[in-house]
Image (cartoon, rainbow, N blue to C red):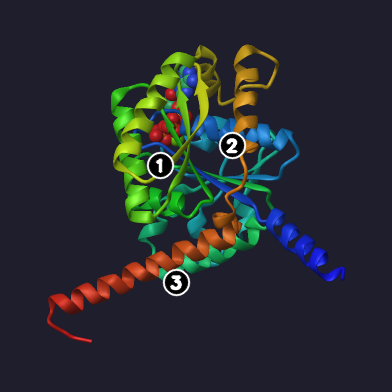
Amino acid sequence: MNMPSQELNQDQSTETHSPQVISISSGKGGVGKSFLSVHLATHAAAQGKKVLLIDADLGLANVDVMLGLQTSGSIRDLLNDNASLSELIISCKQGFDVLPGGTGLYELTNLNVTEQQVILDNLREAGKEYDLILIDTAAGIGDNVLYFASASETALVVLTTDPTSLTDAYAFIKVMSQQRDVRRFMVIINQTEEMDGHITFKRLLSVSDRYLDVYLDYIGYVPHHMDVRKSIQRQQPLLYDGSDLSRHLEKLFDTLLSRPRDNSRSAGLQFFWEHSLASSLDEEEDDNIESMAATGTTL
Ligand SMILES: Nc1ncnc2c1ncn2[C@@H]1O[C@H](COP(=O)(O)OP(=O)(O)OP(=O)(O)O)[C@@H](O)[C@H]1O
Ligand SMILES: [Mg+2]
């Protein structure tokens, strides 16, 4: 008679042990993805979560620069067998781990399937150690961005009130929903005030509701603040020191982290990598079919 509840408990514990994987993307560049990724990682680590921040961005102020980290080697070194992932992952003093992407991670989509498999196997193993994996993606809707964002459990979209940022965020959501079948997005509006943040979110929601089949979850806004620029220039993340800005960020991140997990996509890196690989294999298959069709070769 005890069997069903034991089975349920086992199921639940398997579920809770898979890391939550969140990608941070934007459409337009320079809107604050890396700033938010680093501070979300810091906040989650302070709450006792084991966090890995994967830097899949080659922006100007990328994660290692923001944290003042010295990187050694690149993810590409895994392919030459002269590095292990643990040598590439850096523990930072804010209490979380960083995997600097370098060109290898940024160009992952350009590697062949065997090379991808080597990297993915390594990452899947390493990923099991964590509660939360954050992926700071590049701007835009390039293959690399879609690859990471579509394979995550949750896609967080960051934008500002700038109209081009709104258009680009919409383009990102549109491509993700229509080409990758991702339907749920969290949204943060950066560098604004409460009212303007709401208005911008309403605009994004209105156009998305009208043309797309998606669910947008407004997490909140982040004010424009001089301390952000200063902290990036100093290569020192903001401290959670009780200032208005730090309390605002803490509340925002608590809201984000308290959102229920998406059970349909919550298998952590297992899902993440297998899904990614499956889609690249599908694409290869599509290319084969396409070229066979073009040359008149039939099946
Ligand atoms: N809330 C804010 N208040 C003031 N300045 C900000 C804020 N958020 C971001 N910035 C400024 O915007 C710049 C870009 O931020 P960040 O590098 O995080 O953006 P990004 O989206 O990661 O850019 P990229 O697309 O190049 O990767 C930062 O150098 C910082 O000066
Ligand atoms: Mg960035």
Residue for point 46% across, 48% down? 102
Other residues around mark 2 within 10 Å, as few (<14) / some (14–19) / many (≥20) = some
Q: Position of residue 104 (x, y in %)?
A: 44, 54
Instruction: Give the camera-side residue of 26 and 58.
Output: 26
Sequence-first tag of 3 and 1: 3
Q: Which residue is mark 2?
A: 69
Q: Which residue is mark 1?
A: 138
Other residues around mark 3 within 10 Å, as few (<14) / some (14–19) / many (≥20) = few
Quadrant showing the N terminus: bottom right
Q: Quadrant of residue 93?
A: top right
Q: Position of residue 79 (x, y in %)?
A: 49, 65
As drawn, is 118 to the left or to the right of 201?
right
Q: Which residue is mark 3?
A: 114
Res 17 seen here: yes
Residue flagged by tag 1: what amino acid is it?
Answer: Ala
Residue for point 87% across, 68% down? 2
Disc 2, SS: loop
Q: CA distance from mark 2 to mark 1?
A: 19 Å
| Above or below, 82 relative to 187 | below
| Above or below, 44 relative to 287 | above
Instruction: Residue lying at the far front in this picture: please name it.
Output: 1
Sequence-first tag of 3 and 2: 2
The nearer-to-camera label among 2 and 1 is: 1
Residue flagged by tag 3: what amino acid is it?
Answer: Thr
| Above or below, 41 relative to 129 | above
Quadrant showing the C terminus: bottom left
As drawn, is 120 to the left or to the right of 250?
left
Quadrant of the picture in which ligand 1 is shown = top left
The nearer-to-camera label among 3 and 2 is: 3
Other residues around mark 1 within 10 Å, as few (<14) / some (14–19) / many (≥20) = many
